[in-house]
Amino acid sequence: MHVVFIEPRFPGNQKLFVRALAEVGATVTAIGEGSKGSLDDDLKRWLLHYEEVSSVCDEGAVLKALRFIQARAHVDRLEATVEAHIMPIAKVREAAGIPGTSVRTAFLCRDKPAMKEVLRKGGVPCAASTGASTAAEVREFVEQVGFPVILKPRDAAGASGAIRADSLADLGKALGSFGLGQPGRSVAVEEFIEGHEGFYDTLAIDGRVVHEFATHYYPNVLEAMRKRWISPQFVSTNRIDSASGYDEVKAMGRKVIELLGIRTSATHMEWFFGPKGLKFSEIGCRPPGVRAWDLYNVGNDMDLYREWAACVCHGRPSQRASRRLAAGIIALRPSQDGRISGYDGLEAVGKSFGSHIIDAHTPPPGTPTQPVEAGYMANAWLRMKHENYDELRRMLDIVGQTVKVWAS
C-alpha cells in the first residue's frame, strides 16, 4: 500500500506516524512545508519520496504535489493527523479520488453548531448551542438558555479561544473580541454545562471502534487554561472495561462516529458529566493532542502509532490493550511570565515516586516561559503511571503541591 502522509516533521510526534507506516509495510511518501534537507535521517530512511509545498493548508498546492506523485505511482491513502490539516486534506482527497475522511465528515467535526445539530437530531445529548453572526443573535440565544454561556470560534479545538460569559457585562466584552457584525465573522455559542470533563479517544475501522480509551481532566479545561496557580492534570483510566460508568460514554462515542460518517480514523471526543447527566461536547477526527497516545501506550503495553498504521493499511487491529496501568500528566506552571530561574521539589518527588515517573520536561534556567493558555506541555511537565488510578491521582496531586517552577 502506498500512503501519502501530510507534514512529517512538525509537531515532533508526526514522525512516529511515518515510522509506523513503514513498519507495517507501507510505501510512504510525504508532503510537507520544510525542505528535503530539513528531514532527519530517520525520515529520509522511511520515506520513498518527499514533496515540499508552501503550506499544507493550501489545497491547490497540495493537490498539485499529489498529482505529481500520482503520475508516478498509485496512491492508496492520503492521511493527515493534525487538526488544522483535516479539512483541506479532505478536500484534496475527494478531488483526487482517494478514499478516507470525507469533506462532510471533516466539516461536521470542525464546525461546532453544525456538528451538534446533526448529533442532537440523532439522539446524542449535547449542550444547547447555536451559530451566530451578530450580537443580536447571541443575545437572543442567551435569553433562551440563560447565563453562563460559552463563546468560541466555530472551528476551535478544545478550549482554544473560548470565553465564558456570566453576565451582560461579560457578554459585551466577549462579543467585542470576536468582531461580530463584520463580514464573514461567526461564533459558536453554547449553554455552559456544569460537571466533570473528560475525553474519549478511539481508533475505528470502517466505522467500527476497535480501540478505546477514557481520560479525565482535573480541573476542567477552561479553568485549567486560565489560572496560573493551578497545576492541571489529565489522567487516563485503566478501568474503562471494568467500571460500568463508562458504558454510557462508549455508547455515545459509537453513536457519534456513526452519525458523523467517520470510517477508518482516529477520533478525539470531549464530554461532560454532571447534574444534567452525560453530555457530548465536541470531536476531532484525528488523534488527541498533548501526546495522549504516549500515555495510552504506557498504560496498555502497546504502540498506538503502529496500530493506527495497521488500521489504515490492513483494515484490522494487531494489538490488544492490556489496561495494566493508569497514566497521567501534570503541567507545572512558572510563577510568572519571564524566564525560568529554578525549581524546588523535584528531588523530593524523584525520591518518593521515581519508579512511577514515565518522563519529565524541566526547561533549564534562562528558558523563556510560555503563557498559561499555551497548554499542558508549554512549560514544565511530568508524566506518571500506577496500577491503581486513585493512587496515581494522589501522587499527581502531591507533585503539584510539591514542585515549584520559579521565573523572573
Image (cartoon, rainbow, N blue to C red):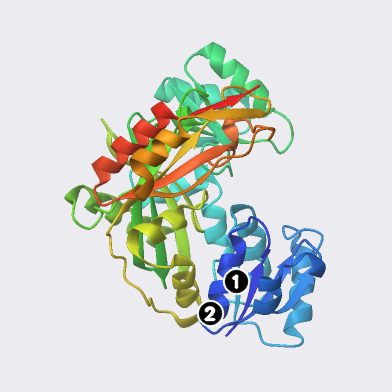
Type of residue at label 1? Answer: Val
Q: Does residue 236 lie above or below 321 as drawn?
A: above
Residue 328 screen position, x and y as percent: 39, 46
Q: CA–CA distance between discs 2 and 1? A: 9 Å
Q: Classify 10 Å Cα crowding around label 1: few (below 14), some (14-19), many (20 and above).
A: many
Q: From the image, which quarter does the N terminus lie in?
A: bottom right
Report whether residue 385 is seen: yes
* Image point (35%, 56%), residue name: 213
| Numbered circle sitting on residue 18 | 1
Q: Quadrant of residue 261?
A: bottom left
Q: Does residue 13 lie above or below 359 as drawn?
A: below
* Depth check, front residue: 30 or 152: 30
Residue 124 screen position, x and y as percent: 34, 48
The answer to whether the residues at label 2 and label 1 have Cβ atoms under 8 Å apart is no
Q: Does residue 173 lie above or below 98 as drawn?
A: above
Type of residue at label 2? Answer: Glu
| Numbered circle sitting on residue 23 | 2
**Residue at the far top in the pictured view:** 169
**Count of labels shown?**
2
| Numbered circle sitting on residue 218 | none
* Depth check, front residue: 23 or 204: 23
Q: From the image, which quarter does the C terminus lie in?
A: top right
Q: Secondary structure at mark 2?
A: helix
* Depth check, front residue: 360 or 202: 360
- Which label's residue is closer to the chain start, 2 or 1? 1
